[in-house]
Image (cartoon, grey):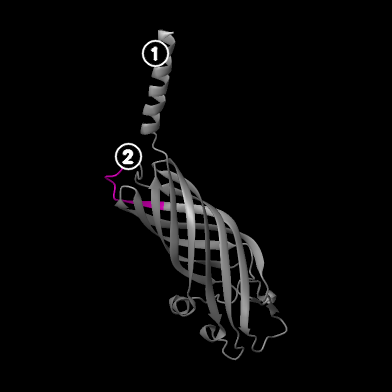
């Protein structure tokens, strides 16, 4: 009986030691940033147009670290952007609109410097981000202006898939508190997020993205 008790004690001690040495941890946080659009409505997008038509987005996320250099997670964010024909050389047509965007995505981060649990001395770490998910959008055309016959208008809500990629850097605020700044570009599986499409031009799919700031708490 004494030997059996000793065996159980060794097993439980090993489990406790292993759990303390396990580098995995969880992360939960909130996001805020800007949102800009490039697509059939704004195919000649430039920095000036992005600043004029830029919107904002906010969200939350949760992640799980599989190792000090890789995480996987779920994230959701909501935002909007505006579009104006006057910014794209079509003042005579005169269409203005706002599109609301909701993303629900799966993502992974490939961290280039070990970060997280046990790596408190690394105060920053650059990373590459990849992911995919669903995008739900709702164009609201404020002024139809003068629409040509060869133009299709999509003033209704829709959904599609999106694939995204980006780069960022993490900053440690405290041992269990982190800040990240990243640039992300989404490629949508639709060309209707701008609300107005001229099919004869054979436009490419919409893209959207911007800069996001993430604050998170590390749980371990």
Magenta span has 69? Answer: no
The structure residue drawn at horizontal position 62% and vertical position 71%, both measured from the top left corner, is 138
Image side of residue 60 versus residue 192, left or right: left
**Residue positioned most to the bottom:** 92
Residue behind mark 1: 6
User: Reading the chain from its start, which is encountered first: label 2 or label 1?
Assistant: 1
Image side of residue 127 versus residue 149, left or right: left
**Residue positioned most to the right:** 149
Q: Where 90 falls versus 121 (above or below)?
A: below
Instruction: Report x, y in % for residue 100.
Output: 57, 71
Tell me the chief SS of the magenta region: loop
The structure residue drawn at horizontal position 43% and vertical position 55%, both measured from the top left corner, is 29
**Residue positioned most to the left:** 121
Give the residues in magenta.
Answer: 118-127
The C terminus lies in which quarter of the figure? Answer: top left
Image side of residue 39 versus residue 154, left or right: left
The image quadrant that residue 193 belongs to is bottom right
Instruction: Report x, y in % for residue 22.
Output: 39, 34
The N terminus lies in which quarter of the figure? Answer: top left
The image quadrant that residue 117 belongs to is top left
Q: Where 9 falls versus 82 (above or below)?
A: above
Q: Which mark is residue 139?
A: none
Disc 2 crowd rating (10 Å Cα; few below 14, some 14-19, many 20+) is some
Instruction: Report x, y in % for residue 206.
Output: 58, 68
Q: Where 25 falls versus 106 (above or below)?
A: above
Residue behind mark 2: 118
* Front in this rendered view, residue 164 or 134: 134
Instruction: Report x, y in % for residue 101.
Output: 57, 68
Q: Secondary structure at mark 2?
A: loop
* Front in this rendered view, residue 186 or 30: 30
């Amino acid at each position: 009986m004494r030997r059996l008790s000793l065996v159980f004690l060794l097993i439980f001690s090993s489990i406790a030691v292993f759990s303390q040495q396990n580098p995995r941890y969880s992360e939960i946080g909130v996001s805020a940033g800007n949102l800009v659009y490039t697509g059939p409505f704004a195919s000649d997008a430039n920095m000036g147009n992005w600043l004029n038509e830029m919107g904002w987005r906010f969200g939350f996320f949760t992640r799980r670290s599989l190792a000090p250099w890789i995480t996987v997670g779920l994230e959701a964010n909501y935002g909007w952007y505006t579009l104006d024909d006057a910014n794209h050389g079509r003042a005579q047509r005169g269409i203005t609109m706002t599109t609301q965007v909701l993303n629900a995505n799966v993502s992974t981060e490939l961290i280039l410097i070990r970060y997280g649990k046990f790596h408190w001395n690394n105060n920053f770490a650059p990373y590459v981000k990849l992911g995919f998910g669903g995008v739900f959008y709702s164009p609201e055309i404020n002024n139809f202006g003068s629409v040509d016959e060869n133009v299709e208008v999509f003033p209704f809500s829709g959904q599609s898939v999106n694939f995204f990629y980006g780069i960022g850097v993490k900053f440690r605020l405290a041992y269990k508190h982190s800040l990240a700044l990243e640039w992300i570009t989404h490629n949508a599986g639709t060309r209707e997020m701008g609300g107005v499409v001229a099919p004869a031009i054979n436009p490419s799919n919409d893209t959207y993205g911007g800069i996001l700031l993430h604050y998170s708490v590390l749980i371990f």
